[in-house]
Image (cartoon, coloured by chain):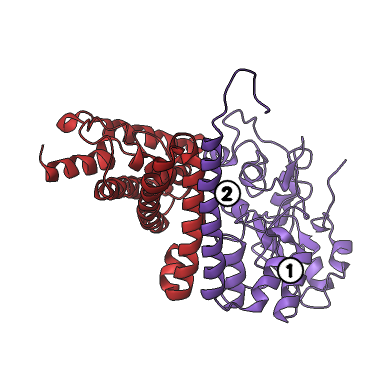
Chain colours: A purple, B red
Amino acid sequence: MGCRKGRQVDWSLVWKAAIALGGLSLFFAVLLAIAGEKFKVETDPRLDELLEAVLGTNCGACGFPGCEAACNAVLEGRAGVDVCVAGGQGVVDAVAGVMGMEATRSLRGIAQVHCKGGLRESKPKAVYQGIGSCTAAELIAGGGKGCKYGCIGLGTCRDVCPVNAIVIDEDHRRWVDRDRCTGCALCVEACPRGLIEIVPRDQEVLVACNNRDKGGKARKVCSVSCIACRKCEKTCDFDAIHVKDNRSWIDYDKCTQCGKCIEVCPNNVLVRVVPPRK
Amino acid sequence: MNEAYRYFLVFLGALLIYNILLIRFIALCPLIGVSTQVETSIGMAMSVLFVMTMASAASWVAWNYILKPLHVGEFLYIPVFILIIASLVQFTEMVIKKTSPPLYRAMGIYLPLITTNCAVLAAATESVKPGFLKLNVAYHFSLPECLVYTIGVALGFGIVIIIFACIRERLETSPVPHAFKGAPLAFMIAAILSLAFMGFANLLGL
């Protein structure tokens, strides 16, 4: 029966194996079924709903060990409704719905590089041929770039980004992919020049320069540098933009993103978030 | 060879000389995965001690009273032991969750991880088939011997994973070359620690 000719099958052994394994399985099944009833623990019914709402991949991006721990943290108030970093806005809304809370504005920030000058805009003062890392270049007289405040462009931020949200083109200009960025702030720590800031996710008007030199000097090193002309400050109707240390700063709480400052900026330092150049 | 000395040899053999992590390289996933913080590694070590002892005792009983009398052990022991371990871990998790929430919080997240861990299966298998020890006196463990052996294995696991976590915690703040950060360095440390543990080889004739 199903085996090669001339070989005897010891059916008693087969039966014994079936009985041993089947019997043990049955025993443990009954044991677990009884235990499941007897040792039932009342949990918050919202926990199951939360587990449905979050991504449920146990990715660990939130910093909790697994989705269940994260959901418990939300229930206990140790984490906000935006705990599921990887899920994006849809999941945040769902979690907020379960918890009966309003999903707040700009739940998690987004990285923004405060420099838009690439090789074309900012004249190089030297050719840097060292290790391909901004940290190394910064140690050797700041690399080859003319501007000593701006982006070096060797991509240390891109290398640390766990979700590949930072793109650097051949002109050493860089873009943050707003759909991918989770606001983890690893790039903020990695940048040797402190150019990257976490800004509110729905903030579109941004200052794309970090040059702290006076106007003339700033203009010399880069064609898209902030020359601290204060035109934006004067134009703003909401007192949301100020010049300090020879560059302008936006107060994200006050900014209504009307874009008036973008129109008056002579060097196009103020930008509405730019898509990658194709 | 008197009784106490044999227990001592079984324990020492399991603990150091045939250390499950560094000499036999079983259970590499917790060694690399759960050893980044001392606190979590202690939790893992405690859970392993608990589950391993329980699983081996249950496996010993199943082997000696079910599998061996039926003569089906030789080909059925792996599925049966996996069944026993998985069910017992589930059962224990339920009991702990109900009766002792603090213990559950300390061990809870590690219990499901251990369910299908190879170290637990290895300890259960070896407590009924202790072939690797050069102790020709005890080819079949009695239940107390099996318990001593398993506790030795689990403590060996615990000691190594805690040492490992301490080293890795310090390395976290050390200037490590970028390419070596994380798992590559962990494997190198494991290799060096393993060399250190090889120094125990042939101790007391084991």
Q: CA distance from mark 2 to mark 1?
A: 28 Å
* Residue of label 1: A92
In the drawing, does residue A76 fall left or right of residue A51? Answer: left
Residue A73 is left or right of residue B43, and the answer is right
Asked whether A140 or B101 is in front, the reply is B101
What is the residue that sits farthest to the left in this orientation? Answer: B2
Residue for point 13% across, 44% down? B3
Residue A31, numbered label? none
The image shows residue A29 at horizontal and vertical percentages of 56, 60
Callout 2 crowding tier (Cα within 10 Å): few <14, some 14–19, many ≥20: many
Mark before the other along the chain sequence, 2 or 1 = 1
**Residue designated by label 2:** A190
Give the chain letter at badge 1. A
Is residue A3 shown to the viewer in this render? Answer: yes
Compared to residue A254, the image places residue B168 above or below, namely above
Q: The disc labelled 2 sits on which kind of residue?
A: Ala
Q: Quadrant of residue A262?
A: bottom right
Of residues A42 and A78, the one nearer the viewer is A42
Q: Relative to the observer, which residue lies in front, A263 or A95?
A: A95
Q: Quadrant of residue A152?
A: top right
Q: Amino acid at mark 1?
A: Val
Question: At 40% across and 59% down in the image, what residue appears?
Answer: B43
Nearer to me, A192 or B108: B108
Q: Name the subunit of mark 2.
A: A
Q: Secondary structure at mark 1?
A: helix
* Residue A202 seen in render: no
**Relative to B18, B168 lies left or right:** right
Q: Where residue B83 sits: x, y (%)? A: 51, 50
Where is residue B200 shown, x and y percent of the image? 22, 33
Mark 2 secondary-structure assignment? helix
